[in-house]
Image (spheres, coloured by chain):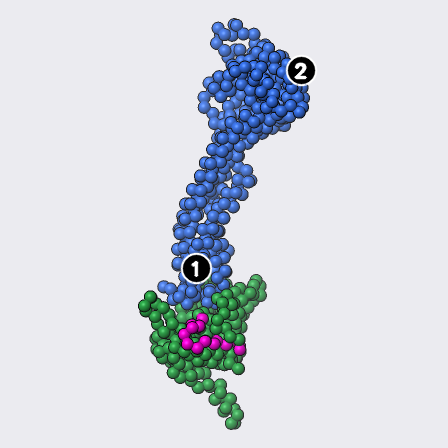
Amino acid sequence: MRLVRDLGRRKLRSGLTITGIAVGIMALVVFGSMANKMNALIGGGSKYYANKAVVSVGSMYSGNIQPLSLSDVKRVEGVEGVGAAMPTLDMMLSDTGGATMGTPEMITADIPGGDKGYETFKIDLAQGRTLATADADSKVTVLGSDLARKLNANVGDTVTLRDEPFKVVGIYAPTLTAPDKDAYVPLAAAQELFVKSLPPLIQANINPSVIATGIVVYPKAGVDPEVLKTRLEAMLGKDYTVMTGKDFDAMLGSFSAIFSMVLTGIAMLSLLVGGLSTINTMAMSVAERTREIGIKRAIGASRWRIRREIVLESAMIGLIAGLIGLGIGAAMTMLFNDLGRASGNVLFDLTLGTALTAIGFSTGLGAVAGFVPAWGASRLDPVTALRYE
Amino acid sequence: MALLEGRNLRKTYRLSRRNTVEALKGVEVSIEAGEMVAIMGPSGSGKSTLMHILGLLHAPDPNHGPAPELLLGGENVASLSDNARTKIRARRMGFVFQDFNLVPTLTAAENVMLACEYAGIKGKQAKVAAVEALGLVGLADRADHKPSELSGGEQQRVAIARALVNKPEIILADEPTGNLDSDRSAEVLALFRQFNREQGQTIVLVTHDSEVGDACDRVIRMRDGRIRDQGHRAVDQLAAGEAVA
């Protein structure tokens, strides 16, 4: 309490210093939450791609995913070490597309049971059931949590996906990753939607029932996905892309690294600005209190005690600033998430770890900044300090 | 045995590279337990320097002439470390200064409790001791007031309570009445006198004020960094008088 009172006697200066650090901490919280979300997305993808190989035509990142044909699936199944090969079909939910932050909403389809039990990546259900073999020819869907909220859909409702009505049979629990924005449908339904989206001239020449955009290849137990990838590439040739968990990690690891760098940059900046302004504030407060320090030393306060007093006061500045920064940052992430939820853009994930790091960081910053003036104060000669005007 | 005994006390302050001031030029002084002594002298006579050395705020110069000795209760404290001197100040000494020197953000009781804290007494025990000390100086009802809500005389009485609270062996006061009008001075002086008489509290006062000097048992007079007159011990005279009677 005494500490707070000491801060309170220079309200404006303490307030400005606290505001300065709080802004830095707020930025740290907001960007940290964003990085959490990004890392969750990447981590989710990394988990999905682990221990499998995904075949597509052309480059997935050229933005041009051409259809594969089911005959490709047959060829892949013949490769040594392949446990199961399942055709998948992914397409944007909305034709208009446009820029979305994070991941886009997708219609994604595969054959229920097509993984032959190899798939280890499972998403928990919030409501209803997953797609079953019996659904193969029905217009049914299981929605990701964000998409369900956006469409305001519950199990039993009918939603419209690309102008076709689909009955919602299940809703997944939030994963905070890409599947939250997906609508899962049976392959046949997706094939129909896919063909409908093509220009009429092409439509006429395509048999919907053979199209896929990707093949998920599960290696047999004990087969290294990387080895399998080499074999698949040798068999399929240059026009096909085979991606494994390792490729995914290599590609998106750099995103993660950039985010970490931005975050570190913000942390260093607030360290510098906040630290210097805290040193300044505390140095001024020590100068103003020279006599008080003198009297305390005279009546028996040890140097250590004087140091501790100033470091604690400085840490208190950091703690208060951290709490304020965290409060504003948390409010901002919540507000943005609420605003974004309507359009399916949940961009921030404020974790307990991020919150504690922010508070710890600013408190530590305050304490460290306090050391410089504290050291000076503790070296004051009590008699000289008492005479200080 | 004297409570506080100094020999060969010298102190030279260096004001700049060339300019040094010889504030104490070899002083011998002895303070008996239970004495109330005034140190008087013109400005620059070395009286404050002597008090700072007696109060272990400064150490005497170790290397100008014969080795200094400063005995507190028979133990040589002349060359102790800063930490050791701080501990003695906290536990065995009380200080009162001219400018009252209270911490402005703390209440009267909290100011007194600071001294308890430094002496290693905490919590409820410190609170009780502080309130008791404030009672002794007649400010029990002002315990929760901040210094800014107290008059100068009251502030100085809080400072005296702070000096007293640990029941120190010796109280050192530097111009304790210097910033008070004559009525308040008389009050403060009466308090010191009372503690000295009733509790045998040893008190050393540095003062300009001859009225303060007159109220003490003995006046040590200084000039130019030396003691000119050790003064007469009223206690000795009293004892002698009693023996005669």
Q: Amino acid at mark 2?
A: Ala
Distance (Cα) linking label 2 and label 1: 79 Å
Q: Looking at the picture, does residue A151 appear above or below residue B33?
A: above
Q: Residue B40: horizontal and vertical position, in percent? A: 39, 79
On whether residue B63 falls in the magenta region, the answer is: yes
Residue in view at x 53 percent, y 40 percent: A354
Q: Position of residue A302 (x, y in %)?
A: 49, 63
Residue B195 visible in the current orientation:
no
- Callout 2: few (<14), some (14-19), or many (20+) C-alpha neighbours within 10 Å? few
Which residue type carries mark 1?
Answer: Ala
Residue occupying the far bottom of the picture: B244
Q: Relative to the observer, which residue lies in front, B158 or A264?
A: A264
Q: Which residue is mark 1?
A: A377
Where A287 sits versus A114, above or below? below
Which x, y percent locates residue A125? 63, 26
Chain letter for the residue marked with disc 2 in the picture: A
- Discs 2 and 1 carry the same chain letter: yes
The disc label shown at residue A134, or none:
2
Determine the colour of chain B.
Answer: green
Left or right side of A223 for A314: left
- Judged by its main secondary structure, the magenta piece is loop
Asked whether A82 or A364 is in front, the reply is A82
At horizontal 34% and vertical 70% (from top left) the residue drawn is B20
Could you say where residue B153 lies in the image, as x and y percent from the top left? 42, 71
Q: Which residues are magenta?
A: B59-74
The residue located at (48%, 60%) in the rendering is A306
- State which tag comes first along the sequence, 2 or 1: 2
The mark found on residue B122 in the picture is none
Dot 1 crowding, Cα within 10 Å, few <14, some 14–19, many 20+:
many
Q: Is residue A148 magenta?
A: no
- Using the rendered image of the protein, determine whether residue A81 is visible from the camera's viewpoint: yes
The residue nearer to you, when weighing B104 against B172, is B172
